[in-house]
Image (cartoon, rainbow, N blue to C red):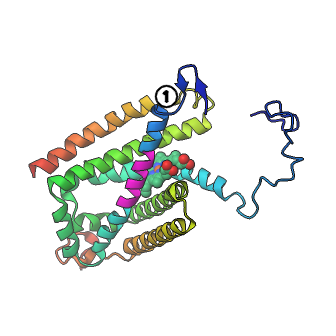
Amino acid sequence: MSATTETNYHAGPDAVSAKKSRYRRVSKGRGNFELWSWVFMRASGILLLVLIFGHLFVNLMLGEGIHGIDFAFVAGKWSSPFWQTWDMLMLWLAELHGFNGVRTIINDYTEKDRTRWILKGLLVASALLVMVLGTLVIFTFDPCLDPSSTLSVCAR
Amino acid sequence: MAQAANGTLYRGREGMWSWVAHRISGLLLFLFLFAHVLDTALVRVSPDAYNQVMEAYKNPVVGIGEAGLVAAVIFHALNGLRIIAVDFWAKGPKYQRQLFWAVAIGFVVLFAPFAIRHLTIVFTH
Ligand code: HEM
């Protein structure tokens, strides 16, 4: 598209430039929300790549792989502030990135306002549940709940 | 839509199918994340509750499902980088098809070692 809208060579003879037009093509009120959500999808995507690949490598490739996942494994990780922070960032970024992506998908396929608002209501509710519950679990977790724990933080 | 001499440039080709796969994998990952946070929350209930559910997951059907999820996230992540390259790199749109094949190669390189190790564990325990 040519940058000079004043002389629009591609439009027909009756074309009116955007500046002179009586129609407001820029919607009021939403600000730059869609632009920032576009930027967020890309920035969070790059961070998620590192966080999720790291998560999968440590949990599924090192040690005993999937077979080693049990309470003791989680306790070992979440007794360290490093993994608590890692998992919290991954939780928030993945949920907000996924939330934003599914919001786009809902906007694309729903035709009735009612259906759209019901689906978005469910989406907001589920995202809040996942972020609040997930964060509480990471930070109120007690690794010593298991009486047979061999973790040094649990030594009495 | 942009037209080439022999049809459209985009529809039905790498550009469109990678978009479809990106959308489906993103939705799948979002649904999985919901289940994954709920089952992990069981560590807050009791060690037994969590261990029982993890034990129930250790079967070939769930194991193959897990491999499918890892495939979905590897594709979505690499294709996400492709989307970012198309948006920000001046030559990105020109090479979007070649970038798609780079995603395909990266996918095989990352997924093959994982699938071998994971499925070996799933089927030998
Ligand atoms: C692993 C690293 C990831 C990267 C690099 C990544 C990258 C991206 C990018 C660049 C987009 C396109 C946004 C746009 O077109 O404006 C996108 C869309 C999306 N992503 Fe991700 N993503 C990642 C992980 C995830 C995860 C974990 C989820 C699920 C919780 C997810 C769910 C989605 C959804 C639902 C969309 C919308 C698809 C659409 O509009 O067709 N992504 N992602």
Left or right: residue B81 compared with residue A83: right
In the image, the segment drawn in magenta is B22-32
The x and y percentages for residue B14 are 46, 32
User: Magenta span has A131?
Assistant: no
Query: Looking at this view, is B99 or A84 the one in front?
Result: B99
Could you tell me the amino acid type at mark 1?
A: Arg
Query: Looking at this view, is A9 or A129 the one in front?
Result: A9
Q: Secondary structure at mark 1?
A: helix
The x and y percentages for residue A25 are 78, 52
Residue A107 against residue B85 in the figure, above or below: below
Q: Chain of mark 1?
A: B
Query: Looking at this view, is A10 or B18 the one in front?
Result: A10
Q: Can see residue A45?
A: no
- Tell which residue pokes out farthest to the left in this image: B124
Q: Which residue is at 41% across, 43% downward?
A: B21
Q: Which residue is at 52% across, 53% downward?
A: A44
Q: How many marks?
A: 1
The quarter of the picture where the N terminus of chain B appears is top right
The x and y percentages for residue B102 are 43, 30
Residue A122 against residue B72 in the figure, above or below: below
Q: Is mark 1 within 8 Å of ligand 1?
A: no
Q: Which residue is at 49% across, 61% downward?
A: A99
User: Magenta span has B27?
Assistant: yes
Left or right: residue A4 compared with residue A100: right
Majority secondary structure of magenta residues: helix
Residue A65 against residue B86 in the figure, above or below: below
- Tell which residue pokes out farthest to the top in this image: B5
Q: Name the residue beneath numbered marker 1.
A: B97
Q: Which residue is at 35% across, 47% downward?
A: B72
The x and y percentages for residue A8 are 83, 34
